[in-house]
Image (spheres, grey):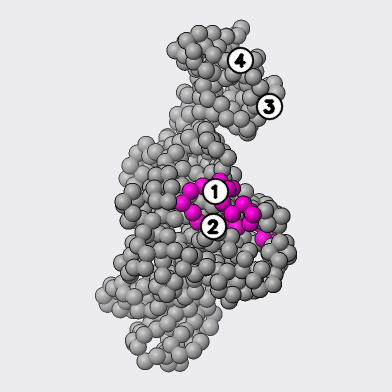
Amino acid sequence: MKRIAMAAAMAVLVGVCGAAFGQEAQPAAPPQEKTVLDVIEPTQGRPVIVLPEQNFHFMFWMEDVELQKLEASLVHSLSPSERVPLTAPVPPFRIQNAYWAMILKPPALAKPGVYDLYIDMGQYYQRIPRAVKIVSQFKDRFRFVHLSNMNVGEPTAPDFDSRLVDEINLLNPEFIVATGDYLDQPGRNSPDDWRRIMDFFARFDAPAYLLCGDMEDPAVFQKAVDSSPIGSFDYGGCHFVLTLDTQTHPIDQHQTNVEAVLENLKEARNAKMSVLVGRSDGLRILDGLRAIGRDPVEVFAQYKVRMMICGGSTDWDFLENADKLETIKAAGVQYVRTGQSSTSMKNGGSGVSRYRVFEVNGQEIDCAYRPLSPDREAQHSIPAGRLRVFDHGRNDGSAATEHVSVVNTLNQSFGDCRVVMRIKGDDPQAVKVANCRLEEVLRGPGHLVVLATVDVPERASVQVAATTDPQVEQSLAKLPVEFAFGGDRTLKFRQGRSPDGMVYYEQPGPIPLTVKNLSDQQTTVSLQVRLGGEALVLSQTGSTQPGDASAQAAALTTTETLSLAPNATASVSIHPVLRNLTPGQAYLAVYCLNDPLQRVSIERVNVTLAPQ
């Protein structure tokens, strides 16, 4: 049959509502996974982001099959034990021919998170990974990530880079955009190829919007990812337009695609800002707009286009398409290209997987990354492998306590990173965390999944813990001390050279640090102060001359132990001497080394280099 009879439709409605109230009849045998429905919306590559109790459409094309039932629910990406029933306010309705739609709604108490859409058809079930994200609110300030050309299968990129998964999951973006060229197989795109791509993106704890690239056939893309290679989505007041612009389908040669972009922008005229996302870095949209008699500067201003994001093989160096960049600059639009998100060295790739992090704040959007040693003027993306998570235990739910360290050797700080800790227990209320903020506790099979957020300074580390053991909770208590920095927040370094010829950077004069014991007990604290990842010289009295000391002697004075009487204070002098210097905003990080979690207190400073 190519339709669902009315009686069957009513049965579906009863089945869906019954699932919502826990009245589902258990099947005689476990259902088998099978692709029965050709899902049109939402898909893994074009997910939906909704609030609790917000309707969304489930659209599909159905073959000539008999269905025992059709029930929908959500399965949490981090814990299959967490399921969200979906209700259907109206019966399924046919759009045309064999195309059908349902309106689905998550309940008010649905937990925020990324979910797989689970369709139960009785004998069979179908699962669409990472198709739905539930948010408690749409944020004005949020983060998203861009992944570019991967070219997996090329000799220097035999597989997808798992480091991208670990790092991006830690960064906790609201979503990911990926601009094509996933496999280095132009024109082939078999179902197995797409399954490999989708399996990779199913490892992220964020929904991903996938675009068609040069290596993908748009016709196959429409079957594997979405019915249209072009599209859009909204997050709060931000509107994102996904374009089709590749070497085989240049947008300036397809007037209908240009007009589709315009119409899309027009429909989102009330958005705070719009962002254009595409594969090509040739800025052909400018030519396409002019070809239909529209001025790009006028269009971008009218529809609040703030940024254009594209794929590439290398970081953007501002040398290509210089004349077109002038138009972009005149329109007040940022143009961004991200290097290859794999180890591929094709077309000048670096051999290190790269990604780009975007921070949105209202109508402002920024993606600047400042490398440690820039070798040229460029718009740098972030190299993978320098933002790491270390589990101190097995992190599998077998122990009541789990410690995790986050080490960030990048030259950029990240707020609201997410750490996942699995601990033994069955009562979410018993979970306590240390040195982080508890976000959510999910129930897993025989354990609890703890989601916690933490701020990670640049070139520093943070250690956090979660436990259901009250005794461990007491042992992880924070030391009762507080720190106060004195002096100027602008550090003025000058270059020097040691007697053995080593170049160093030193700020004349120490930075005063006051340490106060907040308790009525004798307290010992072992301090280490770092700037740019380097331990600085400390002293309680007098001063040192680090520039005249050997590196070994300096290293011996980078930790200071203080014994503080009840409610007493002590003064420490910090002597800033660095082997490497990157001017700009940075953090002074004070570690308590005798704290079980080596907690860090930070103070933002401005690092400058005096002229020679």
> Viewer-nearest of labels 2 and 3?
2
User: Mark 3 highlights which residue?
Assistant: 489
Which residue is pictured at 45% across the width and 61% down the height?
Answer: 180
| Marks 2 and 3, the one that precedes in the sequence | 2
Q: Which residue is mark 2?
A: 281
Left or right of 326? Residue 1 is: left
Instruction: Please tell me which residue lies in front, 238 or 220.
Output: 220
Q: CA distance from mark 1 to mark 4?
A: 43 Å
First reached walking from the N terminus: tag 2 or tag 1: 2
Q: Are there few (<14), some (14-19), or many (20+) residues within 10 Å of tag 1?
A: many
Residue pictured at 55% horizontal, 66% vertical: 242
The magenta segment is: 304-325
Answer whether residue 315 is magenta in the image.
yes
Residue 316: mark:
1
**Disc 3 residue type?**
Arg
Inter-mark Cα distance, 2 to 1: 9 Å
Please tell me whether mark 2 or mark 4 is closer to you in this view: 2
Mark before the other along the chain sequence, 2 or 4: 2
Tag 2 secondary structure? loop
Earlier-in-chain disc, 4 versus 3: 3
| Residue that appears at 64% across and 19% down | 612
Q: Indicate the secondary structure of the residue bearing disc 3.
A: loop
